[in-house]
């Protein structure tokens, strides 16, 4: 029963968005088309020079590629950890499975800054991870985790894993266990059943989760800043640097526009995938 | 089985695999998966536990493992952390309250109205969750700079500036919660109330609101957490003066890593974990799919 | 219907949903204390009609008149009608008592008066002691009775029920039919009930309104609807009927003579005597309808000859199918105790039992 008489209730929020949110988004995108004229100011002329600089300069290029690489590694890692976990939670309703499920929620909602603090110690050269690896005799010299993609991607996987699993879970739940029983009843082993039945049917969830994690990772700020460090020159960190240290609003806005475009493409892809999986059901 | 099951004719395989062997293989699956889950659980918990361990070491500087144990750092937490906590809570409450006032009616209009271009309006009003918090920070910073240039009014570094930005960023959590709840709300409930003598306003407060309020509460709760922990947007809008609690930890960690931050971190984690568990357990608040759309932190 | 005072009148009531005509110019008068049922297949406009009466849907055209007053534009809450929704629409966050008390609170009744009425209503629907429960703690039948109690607690002028028994299982539905009728008689409340179930309509109502494609096909008491349907549609929708094609040959003093079209085996009379129906002009094409229970097997004479081709067991009733032509059959009801008929048979019926219906 859709009724016109409810329509007006949208007006306050729509007006707030039209007068604040949309202009805010538009303002930095507009600034990206003006030249920088010193700290905190841009000139009135229109230019594509900022984009030429951002896409042509090695520093910014490297930052962009590193961000994408970090996204890809994080997607792979959270998928490897998360897929079996989602399968486990969806198939076993033991106390432990419920506890792990709860832990995922709690983890996804605890402060990101504080998790960053934890990773700083965990990944330190004298930290527990290096300690355990040395104790096991797997390494002689401590592994350097700080300031490179190795340590950062571990922390990013921690940050994104709950979102991956929570995206996979509804899809896993929707796969009837009868299909797996039928498959193993026909003599297929567990691995074959998973490969032939579970993975194909879970594909929409895998795609949606991967796109979500990718978008989150390339635009993440807190963990990269605390765990990765400035030397990594990830796009998100460069944006922060231009905006708050050198006050080059033109370049900062341009980087932000490029990042937003990238995220938008991924989000649109995710909604296409999501829409298609809904049609299929 | 020597040959992979997938390459053998399906019908004959079941008969050839000894039942006991098949049973044993299936029985292996559960322990392996449980072990995997245990591993992931340790991974998830590790940073939180480490924060606690680091908060009770004796040394001034953070070394692992600590040479001895002390609660000293909890006693020397500087006052600006408390101020930060007060600002964070105040900002989160004010933002969530403002977002509720805007987003709950808007959700009703989207769920029940016949808005022209409903899909587009819906997408616009939900978009702040899709946009990374960092980008929102850049956007509001540039917008406020523009306002200052045009009108001379300074919004940056003010509570109002933070409040506006946080309200917009968290409003989709409430909108999504309301729309999702109303989409499975039978129209007959409200009609029944009208027929029994209630007007539209009466019906909203007597019937609709109480029924959708658990969903709204869960939206409120997640919006609160997102606002409280939002560093990437806030960092651009506070350049001097008072900071929020997570931003204070963030800055101090950048400057000078000390056990005090770990002590504060432990307190925040304990308080929040308790809140989250209470919300999940007793209020049955489960996040709507919106929280799984949280933009990068 | 002791007093034939009209309570509710529908005048040319019409509803369009975009291009769909859901209700097409309905005229209907409903008397005080009457139990009237709108009957028809799904999509014929019953719900839309009852929702317009309740004030939940705005008519495109026409009027709704209650006690001589035009209430077409009066909002639902000021109509003072009780409505039982198909899904009951019980408020899930309120107890049974609070649900029943809700309309009384809206009418600002004093607290003790509310409590008194609530317990009366719980008694009436046989739910005493259940007042403190919530809707989810009740069975389907109990929920249905709470919905009824809530719709009646404020002594409405009219009770509306849209497929109110539809969600119950068959046994409970039969029981609730009797219960609802008992309560309705007790309170003498004018009731408009909607269903697509003909047994329910015939079993409960004082009068039945048969609807067809947004229009009223016939309004009559259940027995009259069965014995005197005015169209093939109603005859077929209400109970079973055998239908044969023919045309009117003449109107005799006590019967109408119809020449049947169907190809019949030789030596069968193709002119039959049917109920006298003078409004079907001589020569016009008609359908002749005979209820299975009106068909008798006879030893000699009879109207038609045929061969038994099958039988369908149905508990106390058994329908026997007789082939009366190459591709034409006729059902008859086998009486309990009769031997199953076999082979060639002769069929007969009283002329009055053969209805002459317009061909459509
Ligand atoms: N809200 C509506 N919007 C559009 N068409 C509707 C609406 N309600 C009913 N209809 C249409 O009106 C016709 C009558 O519907 P309804 O009154 O529900 O029939 P019934 O109750 O007899 O099954 C149907 O064709 C239905 O599809
Ligand atoms: Mg209906």
Image: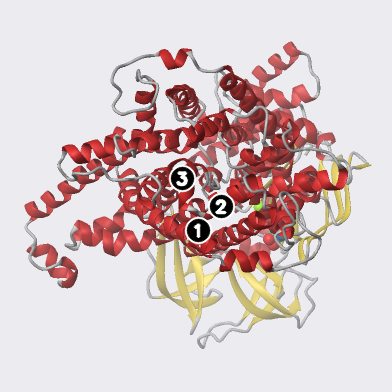
Q: Chain of mark 3?
A: A
The first of marks 3 and 2 along the sequence is 3
Q: Identify whether A95 is placed above or below B110.
A: above
Q: Position of residue A41 (x, y in %)?
A: 75, 52
Q: CA distance from mark 3 to mark 1?
A: 13 Å
Is residue A133 visible from the viewing direction of this image? yes
Give the residue at x 56% y 52%: A238
Residue identifier under label 1: A63
Say which of A151 and C273 sits in front.
Answer: A151
Q: Position of residue C256 (x, y in %)?
A: 72, 73
Q: CA distance from mark 3 to mark 2?
A: 11 Å
Mark 1 Cβ inside 8 Å of ligand 1: no
Give the residue at x 70% y 28%: C186
Q: Give yes or no for contact between labels 2 and 1 (Cβ–Cβ under 8 Å).
A: yes
Say which of C272 and C176 sits in front.
Answer: C176
Q: Secondary structure at mark 1?
A: helix
Residue identifier under label 3: A229
Residue identifier under label 2: A238
Q: Identify whether B212 is placed above or below A278.
A: above
Q: Position of residue C66 (x, y in %)?
A: 87, 41
Q: Chain of mark 1?
A: A
The first of marks 2 and 1 along the sequence is 1
Q: Secondary structure at mark 3?
A: loop
Q: CA distance from mark 2 to mark 1?
A: 8 Å
Give the residue at x 62% y 84%: C261
Q: Chain of mark 2?
A: A
Say which of A88 and C181 sits in front.
Answer: A88
Q: Are the residues flagged by discs 3 and 1 from a single subunit?
A: yes
């Amino acid at each position: 029963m859709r009724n016109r008489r409810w329509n007006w209730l949208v007006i306050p929020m729509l007006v707030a968005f039209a007068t604040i949110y949309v202009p805010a988004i538009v303002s930095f995108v507009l600034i990206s088309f003006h030249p920088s004229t010193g700290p905190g100011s841009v000139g009135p002329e229109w230019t594509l020079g900022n984009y030429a600089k951002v896409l042509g300069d090695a520093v910014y290029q490297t930052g962009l590629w590193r961000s994408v690489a970090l996204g890809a590694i994080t997607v792979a890692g959270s998928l490897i950890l998360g897929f079996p976990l989602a399968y486990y939670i969806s198939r076993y309703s033991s106390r432990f499975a419920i506890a792990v499920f709860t832990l995922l929620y709690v983890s996804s909602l605890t402060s990101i800054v504080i998790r960053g603090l934890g990773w700083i110690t965990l990944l330190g050269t004298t930290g527990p991870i290096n300690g355990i690896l040395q104790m096991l005799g797997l390494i002689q010299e401590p592994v350097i985790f700080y300031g490179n993609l190795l340590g950062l991607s571990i922390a990013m996987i921690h940050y994104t894993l709950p979102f991956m699993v929570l995206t996979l879970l509804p899809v896993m739940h929707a796969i009837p266990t009868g299909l797996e029983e039928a498959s193993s009843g026909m003599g297929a082993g567990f691995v074959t059943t998973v490969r032939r039945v579970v993975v194909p049917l879970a594909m929409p969830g895998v795609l949606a989760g991967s796109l979500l994690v990718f978008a989150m990772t390339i635009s993440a700020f807190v963990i990269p800043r605390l765990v990765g460090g400035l030397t990594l020159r990830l796009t998100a960190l460069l944006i922060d640097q231009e905006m708050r240290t050198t006050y080059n609003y033109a370049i900062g806005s341009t980087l932000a526009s490029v990042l937003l475009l990238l995220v938008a493409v991924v989000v649109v892809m995710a909604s296409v995938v999501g829409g298609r999986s809904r049609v299929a059901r | 089985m020597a040959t992979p099951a997938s390459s053998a004719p399906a019908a004959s395989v079941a008969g050839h695999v000894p039942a006991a062997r098949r049973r044993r293989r299936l029985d292996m699956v559960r322990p392996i998966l449980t072990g995997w889950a245990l591993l992931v659980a340790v991974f998830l918990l590790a940073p939180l536990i480490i924060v606690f361990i680091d908060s009770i070491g004796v040394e001034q500087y953070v070394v692992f493992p600590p040479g001895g144990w002390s609660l000293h750092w909890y006693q020397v937490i500087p006052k600006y952390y408390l101020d930060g906590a007060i600002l964070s809570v105040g900002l989160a409450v004010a933002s969530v309250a403002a977002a509720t006032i805007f987003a709950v009616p808007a959700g009703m209009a989207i769920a029940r109205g016949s808005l022209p271009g409903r899909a587009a309006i819906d997408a616009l009003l939900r978009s702040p969750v899709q946009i990374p918090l960092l980008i929102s920070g850049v956007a509001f910073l540039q917008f406020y700079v523009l306002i200052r240039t045009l009108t001379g009014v300074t919004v940056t570094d003010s509570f109002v500036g933070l409040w506006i930005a946080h309200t917009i960023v968290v409003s989709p959590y409430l909108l999504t919660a309301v729309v999702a709840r109303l989409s499975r709300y039978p129209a007959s409930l409200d009609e029944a109330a009208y027929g029994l003598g209630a007007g539209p306003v009466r019906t909203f407060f007597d019937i609709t609101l109480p029924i959708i309020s658990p969903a709204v509460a869960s939206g409120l709760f997640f919006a609160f957490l997102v606002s409280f922990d939002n560093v990437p947007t806030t960092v651009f809008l506070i350049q001097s003066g008072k900071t929020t609690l997570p931003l204070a930890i963030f800055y101090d960690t950048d400057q000078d890593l000390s056990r005090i931050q770990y002590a504060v971190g432990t307190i925040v984690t304990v308080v929040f974990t308790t809140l989250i568990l209470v919300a999940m357990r007793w209020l049955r608040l489960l996040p709507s799919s919106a929280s799984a759309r949280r933009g990068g932190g | 219907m002791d007093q034939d005072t009209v309570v509710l009148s529908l005048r040319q009531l019409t509803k369009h949903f975009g291009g769909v005509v859901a209700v097409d110019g309905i005229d209907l008068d409903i008397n005080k204390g009457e139990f009237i049922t709108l009957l028809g297949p799904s999509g014929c406009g019953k719900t839309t009609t009852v929702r317009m009466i309740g004030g939940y849907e705005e008519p495109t055209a026409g009027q709704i008149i209650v006690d001589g007053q035009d209430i077409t534009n009066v909002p639902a809450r000021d109509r003072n009608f009780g409505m039982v929704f198909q899904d009951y629409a019980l408020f899930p966050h309120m107890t049974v008592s609070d649900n029943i008390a809700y309309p009384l609170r809206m009418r600002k009744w004093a607290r003790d008066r509310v409590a008194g009425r609530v317990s009366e209503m719980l008694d009436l629907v046989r739910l005493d002691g259940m007042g403190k429960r919530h809707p989810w703690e009740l069975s389907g039948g109990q929920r249905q009775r709470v919905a009824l109690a809530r719709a009646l607690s404020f002594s409405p002028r009219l009770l509306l029920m849209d497929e109110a028994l539809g969600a119950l299982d068959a046994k409970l539905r039969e029981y609730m039919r009797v219960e609802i009728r008992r309560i309705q008689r007790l309170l003498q409340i004018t009731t408009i009930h909607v269903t697509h179930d003909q047994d329910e309509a015939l079993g409960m109502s004082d009068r039945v309104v048969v609807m067809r494609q947004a229009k009223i096909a016939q309004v009559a008491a259940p027995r009259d609807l069965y014995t005197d349907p005015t169209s093939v549609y109603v005859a077929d929708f209400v109970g079973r009927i055998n239908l044969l094609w023919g045309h009117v040959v003449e109107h005799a003093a006590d019967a109408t003579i119809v020449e049947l079209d169907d190809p019949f085996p030789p030596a069968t009379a193709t002119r039959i005597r049917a109920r006298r129906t003078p409004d079907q002009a001589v020569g016009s094409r008609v359908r002749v309808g005979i209820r299975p229970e009106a068909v008798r097997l006879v030893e000699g004479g009879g109207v038609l000859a045929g061969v038994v081709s099958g039988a369908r067991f149905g508990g106390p009733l058994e329908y026997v199918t007789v082939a009366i032509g190459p591709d034409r059959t006729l059902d008859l009801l086998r009486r309990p105790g009769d031997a199953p008929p076999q082979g060639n048979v002769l069929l007969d019926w009283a002329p009055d039992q053969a209805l002459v219906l317009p061909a459509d």
